[in-house]
Image (spheres, rainbow, N blue to C red):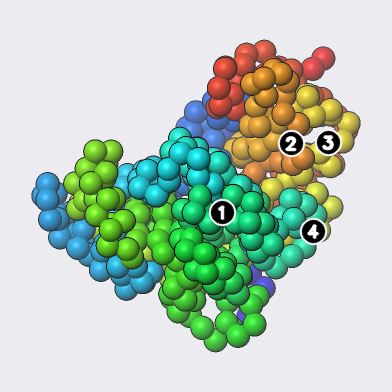
Amino acid sequence: MAKFMAEPFKIKVVEPIAMKTQEQLAAAIEEAGYNTFLLKSKDVYIDLLTDSGTTAMSDNQWAGMMIGDEAYAGSGNFYNLEKTVQEIYGFKYVVPTHQGRGAENILSKICIKPGDYVPGNMYFTTTRAHQELAGATFEDVIIDEAHDSQLDHPFKGNIDLNKFQALIDRVGAERIPYICLAVTVNLAGGQPVSIQNMREVKQLADKHGIKVMFDATRCVENAFFIHEREEGYQDKSIAEILKEMFSYADGATMSGKKDCLVNIGGFLALNDDDLYQKATQLVVLYEGMPSYGGLAGRDMEAMARGIRESVDYYYIKHRIEQIRYLGEKLEEAGVPIVKPIGGHAIFLDARQFLPHIPQDQFPAQMLAAQLYKLSGVRSMERGIVSAGRNSQTGEHYFPKLELVRLTIPRRVYTYAHMDVVAEAVIELYKKRDTIPGLKMVYEPPVLRFFTARFEPVK
Ligand SMILES: *Cc1c(COP(=O)(O)O)cnc(C)c1O
């Protein structure tokens, strides 16, 4: 067997991408103020900004789009989605939403009361924001290893049961409506949770009457890592592992834009009758009827079909191995990356890549800009620019991790594209001493990473 699995699909439709000259790339990044969020998609050669909603759908999913049942109520596509989630994930109830954050909003509103605490394995931006909006305080209970970018650990997304227990002891179980367990942990670098940890979290939570809600967005990637790394799971199928994972959950929020292989969509899955009733009352207000939740019938059909495709062993094996291929190429050339290589992206460690640039001259921002300028590859800064400022003192937050994220869309690019990316990063690494820092010349008041503008330091 080859070390890296070739594509388990062939190409039927192609989308040409722009080939740009060095001059055009330089002009485009200049015009975008050295911010890859401000580049136009038509100027990008290989787009690794995000894996959210950027999936290539299959012929089977596109065929499903043609049988969209666009009835206002009781669409046949909803019943197919419901049946699929029941069969594949094992939940009783499904409430569709326009994307993951729609489900997070509803879950937070039906479960949280002001003054509550919600523990989780590292935060995700929208998830935590909805918990806080509903009046809860978020408490990070991930294992300490997750915060060290160079530490190799097979399940860096695990919950530290002692931290969870300590929170229960400190605030009381009645103020913890649920624990939010993300599988995998996006902000830790796509790091998985072991099935043993899920089992133990569920036991501890049950003992205290606390619910366990999964952020299931990347559950298939997590299942693959369990198959690969956890003893006793090598002979189990991805579908069997998923079923067991969700047997330790009372409910889940899902962004269909990731592991359900669609461009838009999401849902809230639940087992509890009472919570489901409350969710259906709210979904009408925020999303739409409980049988469409902000989605067209065709979108629900594509998501149902995507869920079935996503549990195919070869689909997920190829995805993980393609990312590993890129990561190992970079590692062999000595490029500093976050370890171990996770489920959806490679993270360049800009602090080690550009040690001569102080953090307040935005090394990761500049690295992302230089990568685009050299090769047309678009990536994303995850460092001091994304962290923002302390609203009290006005000072920058100085996060420990100063990273550039190369996120791989599902089924979109080939190994040849990964070679282009690797070669460009390695070339930049060789001439890293010549790369200057940046100064910020425009800064918006909130979420500055989307629209801030920069110029190179002279
Ligand atoms: C993308 C994502 C979400 C939010 O989903 P949207 O569909 O973008 O609203 C939540 N959790 C994780 C881990 C994600 O990656």
Q: Residues within 10 Å of mark 4 (few under 14, many from 20)?
A: few
Above or below for 377 versus 91: above
- Asked whether, in this view, residue 160 is left or right of residue 215, the answer is right
Q: Which one is earlier in the sequence, the residue at label 1 or at label 3? A: 1
Dot label at residue 151:
4
For label 1, the residue is 172
Q: Secondary structure at mark 1?
A: loop
Q: Please identify the quadrant where the C terminus is shown.
A: top right
| Amino acid type at image mark 1 | Gly
- Spatial CA distance of label 2 from label 1 is 31 Å
Q: Compare residues 115 and 416 and report the one nearer the observer.
A: 115
- Asked whether, in this view, residue 351 is left or right of residue 127, the answer is right
Residue 163 image offset from top left, x and y in percent: 68, 57
Decide if residue 306 is in sight here. Answer: no
In contact (CB < 8 Å): disc 3 and disc 4: no
Residue 412 image offset from top left, x and y in percent: 48, 53
Closer to us: mark 1 or mark 3?
Answer: 1
- Spatial CA distance of label 1 from label 4 is 33 Å
- Spatial CA distance of label 3 from label 4 is 20 Å
Q: Secondary structure at mark 4?
A: loop
Above or below for 274 versus 71: below
For label 2, the residue is 399
| Amino acid type at image mark 4 | Leu
In contact (CB < 8 Å): disc 1 and disc 3: no
Q: Residue at coordinates 75% horizontally, 57% vertically from top-left? A: 145
Q: Residue at coordinates 14% horizontally, 55% vertically from top-left? A: 75
Q: Which one is earlier in the sequence, the residue at label 2 or at label 1? A: 1
For label 3, the residue is 354
Q: Secondary structure at mark 2?
A: loop
Q: Which one is earlier in the sequence, the residue at label 4 or at label 2? A: 4
